[in-house]
Image (cartoon, grey):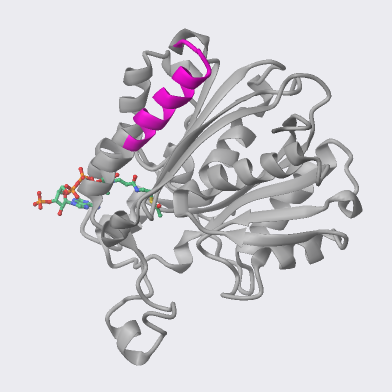
Amino acid sequence: MAIYKAAISAVGGYVPETKLTNFDLEKMVDTNNEWIISRTGIKERRILKEPGKASSFMAVNAAKEALKKNGTDPLDIEVVICATVTPDMRFPDTANTIAKELGATNAWGFDLGAACSGFLFGLTTGCRFIESGAYKKILVIGVDMMSSIIDYEDRSTCILFGDGAGCVLLERSEDDNGFVDADLHGDGNGAQYLNMRGGGSLLPTSAETVKNKDHYVFQDGRPVFKAAVSGMKTATNTILDRNNMTKEEIDWVVPHQANMRIINTLTDFLEIPKEKVMVNIDRYGNTTAATLPLCLWDYEKQLKKGDKLIFTAFGGGFTWGSIYLTWAYDSN
Ligand code: ACO
């Protein structure tokens, strides 16, 4: 039972300056701009190239912007949730590094996996923490430096992913706006289609795992595509049904940016005008845990207090779900 209502009170984002275009990729693997655009909708993605910089660097930049926007002192942050599959190191958690770099020395935090659904799971967790009354100010970050786990000789994956970070500040809502409902799922049977086998306790890094390229993302695209479409549709339907909402009532859809064809299928299913669907896949590609907050970052100025937002994502695991919340402030 919620004691308080949780709401997003600020958004921040960061993408590296370096662009990797489809034309760059044409020179690296057997692919072409037309194929990539028609099959995925991606034109370019950002790559973090600065030596010594990793996921925490992007996350800290995104978090600093969110804190600055509404004048929050880092010392008031109580929890940092960092959704990522590309932490700086296996341990300590990147959330700890982020808190240190921000000067959020009163915060505890943790990393959360769930691949492309990481931000969805993190946002739900953060909102539930606020609702319980245990915490008042939480940073939820989605960050991935996918370039660190991508094989740039594998055309089936290297064209898809990019680097970036997005962050939201969660606080107790001042009115009735904020987090309403989440429908989240997982199915371990999906592991065979989308994974990174090497470097865990099952297959610790060795000369053999490196030779076999087990330290890179593996994806069997077609089954993932089918499961993504059906998972995101079903979860969104559940959210609409459970909240007695019609499709017409949705002001914004915030979909995971994995493939423009998946986003279009979802748009058609929801019978929603394209202008109401947040899209930035053309510029950033799939930034895994960062896609949803980066969408908010890009569209923030268009959001109005009371707007009804549906978030939906699908990722490795398999993991998927949808969230319904109402926007808590006039962003412009
Ligand atoms: N350039 C040119 N041709 C290519 C490329 C490329 N980059 N990649 C594959 N092809 C070829 C294939 O070899 C194949 O050729 P063939 O017919 O001669 O065998 C053909 O194009 C079609 O390949 P498919 O893999 O069937 O292409 P598809 O239309 O399925 O698109 C894609 C591939 C983009 C990966 C798609 O399946 C997809 O988006 N899947 C879902 C991704 C997703 O949602 N992931 C979840 C989140 S990611 C995460 O959690 C980390």
Label tally: 0
| 10 shown above or below 268 | below
**Residue lying at the far front of the rendered structure:** 1
- Residue 287 makes an appearance in the image: no
| 266 shown above or below 226 | above
- Residue 226 makes an appearance in the image: yes
Q: Residue at 41% across / 14% down in the picture?
A: 272
Q: Residue at 90% across / 54% down in the picture?
A: 75
Tell me the quarter of the picture where residue 328 sits.
Answer: top right
In the foreground, 249 or 215: 249
Tell me the quarter of the picture where residue 177 sits.
Answer: top right
* 247 in magenta: no
Q: Quadrant of the N terminus?
A: top right
- Find residue 156 and report its horizontal and vertical position in percent: 25, 56
Q: Residue at 54% across / 34% down in the picture?
A: 182
- Find residue 275 and report its horizontal and vertical position in percent: 48, 17
Q: Residue at 73% across / 48% down in the picture?
A: 139
* 244 in magenta: yes
Left or right: 17 as drawn, with respect to 69: left
| 261 shown above or below 288 | above
Main SS, magenta region, reads helix
- Find residue 154 and report its horizontal and vertical position in percent: 27, 64
Left or right: 239 as drawn, with respect to 226: right
Q: Which residues are magenta?
A: 231-246
- Find residue 99 and report its horizontal and vertical position in percent: 78, 61
In the foreground, 286 or 74: 74
